[in-house]
Amino acid sequence: MLDENYRSILERLDKLIELLELLTKVVAISLNKNAFEGKKKAEQIFLLNDIGLTRDLIAIIADSTPESVSSLLSQIKAGKIKV
């Protein structure tokens, strides 16, 4: 019983750490908006993906849709779009 509770608490803590890391990235981006000024949407999406944000979050930040983000990243990976 104690082991199960302990394991559950550790899983929740791991998830909390993961969410805090994500929040830290989003805050850093929002504080440094000028880093994205003048960049094409493809570049912005590539950079956001590169730092590990989810496609849903990238879509919100880049004013796009998750489907468009996925499509664009696939095209970048295939070399069809240069960033």
Image (cartoon, rainbow, N blue to C red):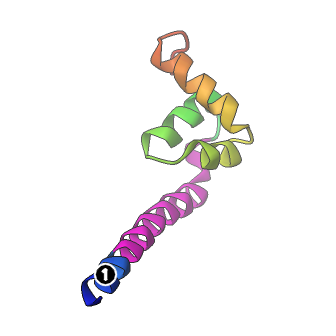
Residue 72, position in %: x, y?
60, 24
Most extreme residue toward the front is 1
Q: Is residue 17 rendered to the left or right of residue 54?
A: left
Most extreme residue toward the top is 80
Kindly identify the residue that appears in the image at 36 percent across and 72 percent down: 11
Residue 62, above or below 16: above
Camera-nearest residue between 30 and 18: 18
Residue 40 in view here: no
Residue 19, above or below 61: below
Camera-nearest residue between 65 and 47: 65
Residue 12, above or below 1: above
Q: Read off the residue under disc 1.
A: 4
Kindly identify the residue that appears in the image at 49 percent across and 39 percent down: 49
Residue 50, position in %: x, y?
43, 39
**28 magenta-colored:** yes
**15 magenta-colored:** yes
Residue 64, position in %: x, y?
73, 37
Kindly identify the residue that appears in the image at 63 percent across and 46 percent down: 56
Kindly identify the residue that appears in the image at 47 percent across and 12 percent down: 78
**Which range is magenta?**
11-36
Q: Is residue 35 rendered to the left or right of residue 40?
A: left
Residue 62, position in %: x, y?
68, 41
Tell me the quadrant of the picture where the N terminus can be found: bottom left
- The local crowd at label 1, few if under 14, some if 14 to 19, many if 20 or more residues have their Cα within 10 Å, is few
Of helix, strand and loop, which mostly describes the magenta segment? helix
Most extreme residue toward the left is 3
- SS at badge 1: helix
Q: Is residue 58 rendered to the left or right of residue 14?
A: right
The image quadrant of residue 7 is: bottom left
Camera-nearest residue between 34 and 5: 5
The amino acid on which the numbered mark 1 sits, given as a three-letter code, is: Glu
